[in-house]
Image (cartoon, helix red, strand yellow):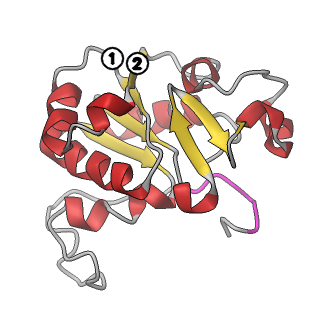
Amino acid sequence: STLRGSAGAMIDGCLDGSGLGHALIAPAFPAAGRIVKDGQLLVEGVPLHETPFRADLGGTRTSQLLLLLSRHTRRSASCLPLAVVESGHEAVGAALASTRTALVVADATSDEHLRTLALGLAAAGPGWLACGSAGLAAHWPLALGASPSAAPAPSWPPSSLPVLLVCASRHPAAL
């Protein structure tokens, strides 16, 4: 949720290794005070590069996600604006399905936006990697057709595709 380390390189590696063509990047986690608005990551309303997390940004003085990602990725990137997210999961799915970039950074300022993004990603069809915080992950079972309160069962996820969870932070909250 604060893009520590080389997020762009990690996403490139996941895309290369999985053979997928696109990634939806949604680091917002409103319950932890992190939102993305106009492509900028805010922590408790403060731009990321003005918070104590700035030490993890390698000297970068920006909170614009496209700029942060561009430092470590060779892929093209674009933003999915809040207006599209607020139009619903069908609009998100259509926007993702028609994108010409490999990476799409999504605005999200509420948990409902993250739910919409998860459902929209599922509607976009195969070929997408979901990259986000625990806020996005909380809605992923619903997007895969499982009950949001259901404990993972041997048949979950309901597809034959593997599930990989990567947590690249040593922060105590992540552990």
Q: Quick one: SS at disc 1?
A: loop
Q: Amino acid at mark 2?
A: Ser
Q: Residue at x 47, y 45 (%)?
A: 109
Q: Is residue 98 left or right of residue 139?
A: left
Q: Quick one: SS at disc 2?
A: strand
Q: Residue at x 30, y 46 (%)?
A: 117
The image quadrant that residue 65 belongs to is top right
Marks 2 and 1, how far apart in space?
6 Å
Q: Viewer-proximal residue, 167 or 161?
A: 167
Q: Is residue 60 above or below residue 164?
A: above
Q: Residues within 10 Å of mark 1 (few under 14, many from 20)?
A: some
Residue 125 can be seen in this image: no
Residue 51 can be seen in this image: yes
Q: Residues within 10 Å of mark 2 (few under 14, many from 20)?
A: some
Q: Which residues are magenta?
A: 167-172
Q: Residue at x 20, y 77 (%)?
A: 147
The count of marks equals 2
Q: Residue at x 33, y 60 (%)?
A: 163
Whether residue 63 is in magenta: the answer is: no
Q: Viewer-proximal residue, 22 or 68?
A: 68
Image spot of residue 118 (x, y percent) = 28, 51
Residue 2, label in figure? none
Whether residue 168 is in magenta: the answer is: yes
Q: Is residue 92 above or below residue 67?
A: below
Q: Quadrant of the C terminus?
A: bottom right
Question: Circle 1 is placed at which residue position?
Answer: 101
Question: Circle 2 is placed at which residue position?
Answer: 78
Q: Does the CB distance between marks 2 and 1 fall below 8 Å?
A: yes
Q: Amino acid at mark 1?
A: Thr
Image spot of residue 61 (x, y percent) = 79, 21
The image quadrant that residue 173 belongs to is bottom right
